[in-house]
Image (spheres, rainbow, N blue to C red):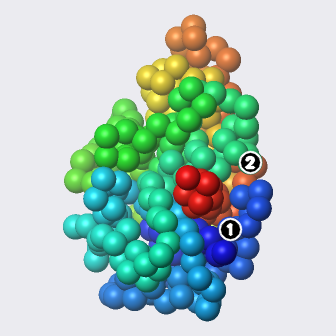
């Protein structure tokens, strides 16, 4: 019996085999190509599955999604932006498998609630800050999915003070201001010569003036967005993961400062924002939880 997990990210796909305890092993990944995106994803799944019969697949995708129809519409994958029927396509690959599909933020929340920083917490928010920004909500001990499966998509909370255009068509979304890709874009507009979020983080920690300003900008926007989400959801725990969230104090210091400035309601006095304990592949782990839940049904 082989159970697979698939993570559809903004810049890469990851897949692996789910084992006991929600561990995902034999992980492979591939960059998202400009064309024939499904071909790359299909090849990855074939590689990971090998010749073993696949009984279940959990799929976590960058959003937006429509879980009712099994369609993914990732904003940062142009070929799929109008919608790709990912559930139907995977079902054709593995006709006997049971499939479960969710937005990546819901998978992140599942992973944090089962094996991460939200274990034992009944009401919380999990966020990923990477190429994009996403999130998932834990309410009364369960993941809140919403009408179409997009609940918790916090990347499109509008933050005050910015009118930066967003890939969604709006302006001032926290993803447009504070994601790794957006921060790199802003830094390059100021004259910085690097090209990746990892390089930007390293430069900020080495006191490069433009990089420090870029991460201060991102952290401030994140803190404001988290304060708004916490006030709306009445929560006292937020966990933040993703590659760009590992940028250290140049990001986290302004985040905490903005949080202190904006999270002023008396029911938010115990609010904690903590880094994720899952250092790699949280969405994939959550997709694995989805898949193992499917096998238990």
Looking at marks 1 and 2 on the same chain, the residue that comes earlier in the sequence is marked by: 1
Front in this rendered view, residue 263 or 261: 263
Judge by depth and name the residue closer to the eye, 53 or 279: 53
Check disc 1 and report the residue beneath it.
18
Q: At 57% across and 8% down in the image, what residue appears?
A: 266
The correct choice, above or below, for 178 with respect to 70 in the image is above
Which secondary structure lies at badge 2? helix
288 lies left or right of 276: left
- Residue 104 in percent (x, y) is at 49, 56
Identified at 33% across, 87% down, the residue is 35
The residue lying at 62 percent from left, 70 percent from top is 3
Which residue is found at the position 52% from the left and 39% from the top? 143
Rendering coords of residue 176 (x, y %) = 38, 52
In the picture shown, does residue 236 fall above or below 182? above
Kindly tell me whether residue 210 is visible in this rendering. no
Which residue does the numbered mark 2 point to in the structure image?
A: 115
Give yes or no for contact between labels 1 and 2 (Cβ–Cβ under 8 Å).
Answer: no
The percent position of residue 240, horizontal first and vertical second, equals 62, 44
Q: Name the side, left or right, on which 232 lies relative to 27.
A: left
Secondary structure of the residue carrying tag 1 is: strand
């Amino acid at each position: 019996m082989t159970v697979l997990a698939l993570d559809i990210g903004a810049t890469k796909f990851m897949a692996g085999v789910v084992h006991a305890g929600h561990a995902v092993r034999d992980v492979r990944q591939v960059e998202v190509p400009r064309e024939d995106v499904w071909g790359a994803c299909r090849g990855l799944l074939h590689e990971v599955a090998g010749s073993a019969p696949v009984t279940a697949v959990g799929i976590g995708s960058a959003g937006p999604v429509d879980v009712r129809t099994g369609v993914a519409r990732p904003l940062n994958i142009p070929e799929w932006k109008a919608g790709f029927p990912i559930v139907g396509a995977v079902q054709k690959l593995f006709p006997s498998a049971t499939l479960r599909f969710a937005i990546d933020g819901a998978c992140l929340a599942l992973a944090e609630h089962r094996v991460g920083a939200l274990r034992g917490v009944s009401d919380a928010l999990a966020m990923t800050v990477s190429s994009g920004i996403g999130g998932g909500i834990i309410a009364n001990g369960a993941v809140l999915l919403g009408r179409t499966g997009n609940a918790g998509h916090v990347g499109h909370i509008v933050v005050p003070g910015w009118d930066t255009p967003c890939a969604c068509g709006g302006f001032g979304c926290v993803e447009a201001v504070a994601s790794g890709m957006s921060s790199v874009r802003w830094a390059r507009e100021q004259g910085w010569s690097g090209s990746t979020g990892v390089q930007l983080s390293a430069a900020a920690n080495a006191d490069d003036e433009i990089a420090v300003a870029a991460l201060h900008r991102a952290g401030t926007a994140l803190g404001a967005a988290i304060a708004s989400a916490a006030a709306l959801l009445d929560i006292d725990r937020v966990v933040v993961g993703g590659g760009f969230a590992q940028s250290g104090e140049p990001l986290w210091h302004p985040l905490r400062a903005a949080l202190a400035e904006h999270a002023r309601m008396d029911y938010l006095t115990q609010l904690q924002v903590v880094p994720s304990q899952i250092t790699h592949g949280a969405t994939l782990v959550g997709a694995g939880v989805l898949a193992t839940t499917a096998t238990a049904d």
